[in-house]
Amino acid sequence: MKLDEAAHEAARELRSSVRATPPAFEDLAARRHRNRVTRLSVAVVLVAIAIVVPAMMIRGGDSRPSVSTSSAEDGSPVAQLNVVGEPTLGFDRSEYTIPRPGLVEVTFSGTDGLTLTFEEFPDFVLGPTPNEPLVGTLELAPGTYHLTSAIPGHTDAGFRSTVTVGSGRSACFDDPGPNTASDGTTFGPVTAPDSGSAVDTSALPDFIPVACPRADGIGGYVRRDDLFPRGFMAESVDVYSTDGTTIVGHLIQGKGFVALDEDPADIPNVTTTTAIATSAPAATATRQWIIPIGAPDDVDPPSTSGNGASPPPRLTSPVEGGPVATRLAELVAPILPGATLGRASDAQLNGETLTGSVQFAYPDGSTLTASVSRYDEPIRLRWIVHSDDPGANSALSRLQTGTEIVALDRSLTRSVIIVRASGISLTLQTATNFSAGLDQPRASTIALEDLTQLAQALDTSALDDVMDP
Amino acid sequence: MDARLDSVSTSTPESGLGGPFGDFYRREYGRMVAFSLALTGDARVAEDLAQDAFIAAHRRWDEIGSYEQPAAWVRRVIVNRSRSWLRRARVEGRALVRLRSRDRVEAPVSDDTRRFWDVVRALPRRQAECVILRYLEDLDIAEIAELLDCAEATVRVHLHRGRTALATRLSLEDDE
């Protein structure tokens, strides 16, 4: 059978599978909302609040479409407020904070039989809690709202909390600096350890600020435990507001902080990468923090099946001396004087050869790995620098703490991010911005000229024929 | 291309919104859901995305309605939101699983058709989008390029790679 023929038949059948009669538009909002929560078996009420004079409108109970005053024009929530009802008739936080007004997705979970409502919006009720979290959506203007229970007696028993919605217009806000919440949770930047020493993760604050890549201030905080000891292996890390529980965005590879109501696909990749070492390995060992290549949107989504969840792409089957690695070695070797070519191999992603990497060793024990990958986007390069000698280069040692980062950008096809470290290894990757916890400016004091030349000397277009069969 | 949609839906008492937007909504709804379905593979999500897009269009209808092809605007919204959905499903999958544990709602299509679109969705995102826009939406290269905000040459490359991969994975003859 021919491809075009099969495609047109599949298109025809897919079109015919969709009902031709649309739902009444006036009920779309309510219907859409019901679709979203039917499987949760929850009662959901949507309230729209005018900025000046709060007026409530319950979706489904009002035939009009909702009136949004949110800055999120596309209807995406600006925050996910996660509230937990405790068996002691209390909420898990005495105060929840949302940096800016807009649509807020409220998730209520916890002890069975509890309810959540707002004193200001008594018709908005989540609960009684079943075994699954309940989700509702509210549009909140700046101000303070009071969370409580719809069950008589619970409020008097202390089942109350507040939700403070800031008046910020952007997703980012001024960094409040190091602080400690009433429950002892600590917020603040990572403090660089002494040169050459390991970072003590246990001494890090519980929440680490995430720089706003496109504005001043911070976008929120990432949980220390979400970053370490995994480093930045995760494609995306939740970013919380100052309460440490309300999700306001994500730290996404290639994008940096992305607010919840932003579409990463609409955000250009940023050009700098920073990462921080967590521990110094044994002198003879190196530890790699491999950031998955490419931003999430650029990684081929594997086939979906079952519940629709997609497994992450997998690099498999190293092919020693594969064509990509061989070509890369030919390109890199001349611009790395003094280095000895080590392992060169290709790798497959979901069965297709798409990456190659070569490793070079220096007399001082350091190694440099250059790898190249191509998914469906221009070639991306990453560099991994290893050093088994923490004292060999003080500058590298400083980099280990994340205090000095060299970052270069040579367009998407040649962008190179350079971070060097001693005693550890860091992935160097294009178009990534992980600046969590790094409150210092990016320095460029480490052999920048050499590295610049190296970056410029490598013509990735010479890889086209092997990378793009 | 948009004219073809006249045969998909007709005005009914259930969808009695009047005016140009009402006509547009009734004419395009089914097709946009199908488009969204091809992108996501989940019938419920497809309706959600399409409805969101129409709500967004309604809010800005004064502007959108003046476009030569308002359907193109809705398609673009759907593409963007499908990316967000896919990202959320993949990147935030653990959170969704934790909070919602939802299952995919299959469209009532044959196994062959389901497999075809599953394989399309397994392509790199942009390849999949190009293939869907080409075969399901019947857009030409220039229209796809405009909708995806990329060069026509890029679309050609994506389509070529997508076709090649589809032909291989589905054991079909690619006569391109």
Image (spheres, rainbow, N blue to C red):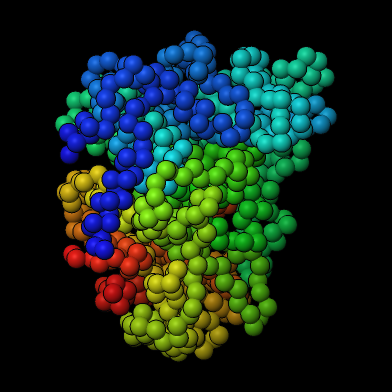
Along the line of sight, the residue nearer the viewer: A234 or A406 = A234
Give the vertical position of B142 relative to A362 (above or below).
Answer: above
Where's the C terminus of chain A, which quadrant? bottom left
Q: Quadrant of residue A17?
A: top left
Along the line of sight, the residue nearer the viewer: A86 or A420 = A86
Along the line of sight, the residue nearer the viewer: A24 or B7 = B7
Measuring 50% from the left and 67% from the top, which residue is drawn there? A314
Residue A286 in view of the camera: yes
Q: Is residue B33 left or right of residue B176?
A: right
Along the line of sight, the residue nearer the viewer: A336 or A95 = A95
Q: Is residue B129 left or right of residue A424?
A: left
Q: Quadrant of residue A388?
A: bottom right
Where's the N terminus of chain A, which quadrant? bottom left
Q: How far across and how far down the image is residue B103, in percent?
A: 55, 44
Q: How far across and how far down the image is residue A96, in percent?
A: 65, 30
Measuring 51% from the left and 81% from the top, which residue is drawn there? A367
Give the vertical position of A357 relative to A203 (above or below).
Answer: below
